[in-house]
Amino acid sequence: MRWDARHSGNRIHLAIEGSCGGTSIGLHMAADEINDGNRVLWVGLEMPNPNRFPQLFAHLSPVASSKFHAMMMSGTLDKAVDAVISAANNLPSVSLIILDDWCEKSGKITKQELVEIQRCSDNVSKEIKIILISKGTVDASGKRIGAIFARSEIYFKENDFEIWTLAKSQDGHYRNLSIDEEVTKLRIVDEGLELVA
């Protein structure tokens, strides 16, 4: 059965284990929104994988696929946020904004990056879902249970973002998506993500 995230909250920080399907989650959610007649803004350091993108969008018509607007983060995050705010407020039917790899892959997320993300959230309709996809971190102390954790977790929780984490299962056959300590098992397939029974 196809995984459906359309009933989730509208502010999400997805922390991922490296190379485990974070971009695929974003593209899967984008395809669902576009299939519903909506428009999606994608911001990243590079375009989505040219092999993966057509697989996830194969069930959509070329006209529908044109509602996926990819923007490159070619400069600083503040310039990308300016472009997102402008597009979200001027294009019709925008329902989803995805910022993929919007911060450094490791280390602390800078205060300036958090300020820019908050500016984006504050200046875009609360009806539009914003998903931040970034590399997570591990708990070096060993006090917490789980494979991966969100950086700046307290900040995001205080600012009404849901915290999601995505990590490979121990055998690597599926992915564990954790939302509020509830774990959903997902399998990556050509069309997107399927629920594992």
Image (cartoon, rainbow, N blue to C red):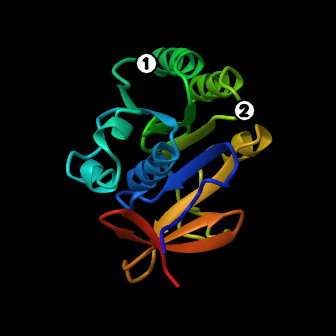
Q: Is residue 145 visible?
A: no
Q: Say whether disc 1 or disc 2 marks the residue closer to the N-terminus.
A: 1
- At label 1, which amino acid type do we have? Thr
Dividing the picture into quadrants, the one containing residue 58 is bottom left
Position above or below: 159 against 79: below
Residue at the spot 62% in from the left edge and 73% down from the top edge? 183
Q: Position of residue 105 (x, y in %)?
A: 42, 43
Q: Position of residue 136 (x, y in %)?
A: 51, 53
Q: Which mark is residue 76?
A: 1
Task: Name the secondary structure under disc 2.
Answer: loop
Front one among 69 and 137: 69
Q: Decide if residue 102 is on the left or right side of residue 161.
A: left
Q: Decide if residue 156 is on the left or right side of residue 69.
A: right
Residue at the spot 39% in from the left edge and 50% down from the top edge? 23
Q: On the image, numbered disc 2 is attached to which residue?
A: 126
Dividing the picture into quadrants, the one containing residue 130 is top right
